[in-house]
Image: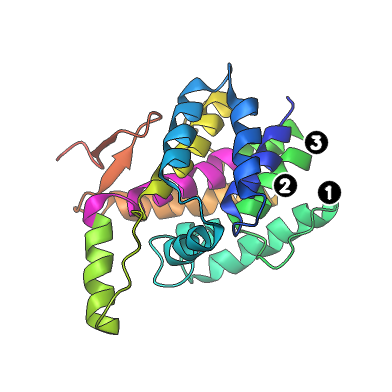
Amino acid sequence: MNLDHYAKFSLLFDYPAQNYYEAIAEVKTVLAGKYDSALEELEKFEKLIPKDIYQLQEIYTKSFEVQAVTSLEIGYLLYGDDYTRGDVMVGLSQEHAAVNNDCGHELSDHLTNVLRLISKMKNQETIKELVRLMIAPAVENMMKEFTPSSMEQKDALYKKQYKTLIVPDVPLAMFMHLIKAIYLVLDTDFELIKENKPFGDTSFFGFLSSELEVEEGKKSSNTSCGPTFDVGGTMGSGCSTC
């Protein structure tokens, strides 16, 4: 499977440079024909973004860095500040080094770097494990953070902490379309179906699988329910009892 399109897509999750608009056009060309649902979401994103690069940079910073809506560091999205994230980042760093994937100024678990990583990796089974166990769940978490209720809670928190907010002219939720687009591409390529993984695998991805099963077990014992997304990005109940 040729995964070069993930390297092109990765540019859209990096801090916007002058070539950002050209990068969108290139990704649209790649998506046309095979990823029509993702293309539709990317076109919605393109219509919403400001044409001024400095304004776009400001909105990107507010969305992902300062008083952020969500994080682009997928290890953090899955594990927070738990020690497990450190182990995951070590494993990812080894995978980056194995294919000479330069992480630049971002961490090894930043979505931009991980998307470029899977475009360079050769072992298809390892790529599938990485996508299904780590990338897809993290992208789902990103989508949840852009729901209106979640964003309202964050705004209330930031207003209380910082007393005032600079509200951009363009809604921050525009990035929801970009995130949904990459999720739809992942779903088309990897058929995102949850699988039961053995605890006996001692590889990095075996370790990751075990940790995710533990985390899912913790969540299943919690009586509260949160929103989930299907492959089309439609929000639904997080548990069958709601």
| Residue at left offset 50%, top offset 21% | 36
Query: Which disc is residue 42 wearing?
Result: none
> In the depicted view, which residue is nearer to us: 92 or 7?
7
How far across and down, in percent of the image, does residue 32 sit? 58, 21
Does 2 sit left or right of 155 as displayed?
Answer: right
| Residue at left offset 48%, top offset 61% | 55
Q: Badge 3, how many Cα within 10 Å: few under 14, some, many 20+?
A: few
Q: Which residue is mark 1?
A: 99
| Residue at left offset 26%, top offset 79% | 164
Q: CA distance from mark 1 to mark 3?
A: 9 Å
Does 234 sit left or right of 56 as displayed?
Answer: left
Query: Which disc is residue 117 wearing?
Result: 2
Circle 3: residue type? Lys
Q: CA distance from mark 1 to mark 2?
A: 8 Å
Q: Which residue is mark 3?
A: 122
Mark 1 and 2 residues: CB-CB less than 8 Å, in contact? Answer: yes
Mark 1 and 3 residues: CB-CB less than 8 Å, in contact? Answer: yes
Q: CA distance from mark 3 to mark 2?
A: 10 Å
> In the depicted view, which residue is nearer to us: 27 or 90?
27
| Residue at left offset 49%, top offset 35% | 42
- Secondary structure that dominates the magenta span: helix
